[in-house]
Image (cartoon, grey):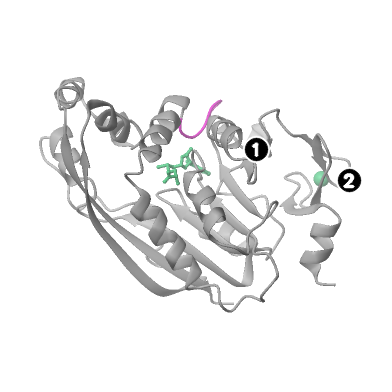
């Protein structure tokens, strides 16, 4: 029996205890480790493994408004091409995994759970208990777990991912903070990382409404340009235009991005007058393997 069969057969997850780093075993209402540390499963289904001494604020991550804006926007299917490309990229990079053994897939910064859910529905080797969504925002885990019951949503930080060493086959990070030391710890030897980062023209038309001068060299801070641990295997660029045909879609896309925090009240007002907008999506998918 393989290690993973043993874990699944015994209801032991690849989640690790944030206090002592040993396996967490799932029970009806909680997860616990052999050292007696106990973590309740919230009524919505998520678990909180973020210890209060590791938080930089009382409610870290995206707030409820931002998560709901993202949910409504994604439900309109505007970002379906992004999700489709993620699923295609994953399908073309998993042939080296043993057939029949369920993949352990973790999305870090999973927000409202849209991408990990569509991925789970597409990738047949996924089944209950081996798709995880990690987000530092409790609101995100709450909203995601209310909607998607076959994914384990966990409140935790990308800085210290609560998974057993070398247990994660696929680590996904879409427009979210990424920390390579933590990723290195949890990624399996044969594991892959899929990262999506916005490029220069991403949401350009929205940024042109929001700022007097658009900073086109505003590169994302979380991109793995000089990685010590991983090998860049492939990149894929998505170039696509979406037509936002109503006021609420424009407000939603604005509220789900960091521009929400940076925009002046005057520019916000200007945006609120728009009834439609064509917006460019320009996103790079970066696929890394473990260098070992
Ligand atoms: C821009 S959103 C992207 C969400 C989702 N991946 C998507 O594309 O719809 C970034 C997400 O990362 C989460 N986040 C921010 N800092 C984090 C950290 N240190 N660890 C884990 N998640 C974090 C936020 O709460 C938010 O849900
Ligand atoms: Zn423990």
Magenta stretch: includes residue 61: yes
* Main SS category, magenta section: loop
Which image quarter holds the N terminus?
bottom right
Magenta stretch: includes residue 205: no
The residue under the point 16% across, 26% down is 267
The residue under the point 49% across, 40% down is 111
Dividing the picture into quarters, in which one does residue 76 lie?
top left
Which image quarter holds the C terminus?
bottom right
x then y, percent, for residue 162: 67, 50
Q: Write down the residue under mark 2.
A: 35
The residue under the point 23% across, 29% down is 263
The answer to whether residue 286 of the structure is visible from this angle is yes
Pointer 2 local density, CA inside 10 Å: few below 14, some 14–19, many at least 20: few
x then y, percent, for residue 97: 62, 75
Q: As rendered, which of 244 and 52 lies closer to the eye?
A: 244
Marks 2 and 1: in contact by CB < 8 Å? no
SS state under label 1: loop
Q: Is mark 2 within 8 Å of ligand 2?
A: yes
Q: Which mark is residue 50?
A: 1
Q: CA distance from mark 1 to mark 2?
A: 18 Å
Range drawn in magenta: 57-62
SS state under label 2: loop
Check the image and report above or below for 149 versus 64: below
x then y, percent, for residue 19: 76, 44
């Amino acid at each position: 029996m393989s290690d993973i069969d043993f874990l699944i057969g015994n209801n032991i997850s690849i989640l690790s205890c944030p206090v002592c780093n040993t396996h967490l075993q799932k029970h009806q209402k909680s997860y616990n480790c052999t050292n007696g540390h106990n973590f309740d499963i919230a009524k919505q289904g998520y678990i909180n493994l973020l210890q209060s001494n590791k938080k930089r604020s009382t409610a870290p991550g995206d707030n409820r408004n931002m998560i709901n804006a993202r949910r409504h926007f994604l439900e309109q299917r505007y970002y379906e091409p992004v999700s489709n490309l993620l699923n295609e990229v994953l399908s073309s990079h998993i042939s080296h995994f043993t057939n029949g053994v369920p993949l352990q897939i973790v999305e870090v910064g999973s927000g409202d759970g849209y991408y990990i859910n569509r991925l789970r529905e597409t990738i047949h080797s996924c089944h209950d208990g081996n798709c995880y969504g990690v987000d530092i925002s409790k609101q995100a885990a709450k909203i995601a777990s209310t909607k998607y019951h076959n994914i384990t949503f966990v409140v935790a930080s990308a800085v210290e991912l609560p998974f057993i060493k070398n247990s994660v086959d696929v680590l996904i990070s879409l427009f979210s903070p990424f920390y390579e030391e933590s990723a290195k710890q949890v990624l399996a030897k044969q594991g892959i990382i899929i990262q999506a980062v916005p490029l220069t023209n991403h949401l350009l038309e929205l940024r042109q409404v929001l700022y007097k001068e658009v900073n086109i060299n505003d590169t994302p801070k979380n991109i793995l340009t000089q990685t010590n641990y991983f090998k860049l295997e492939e990149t894929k660029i998505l170039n696509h235009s979406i037509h936002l045909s109503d006021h609420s879609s424009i407000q939603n896309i604005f509220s789900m991005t960091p521009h929400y925090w940076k925009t002046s009240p005057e520019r916000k007002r200007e945006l609120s007058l728009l009834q439609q907008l064509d917006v460019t999506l320009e996103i790079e998918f970066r696929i890394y393997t473990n260098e070992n």
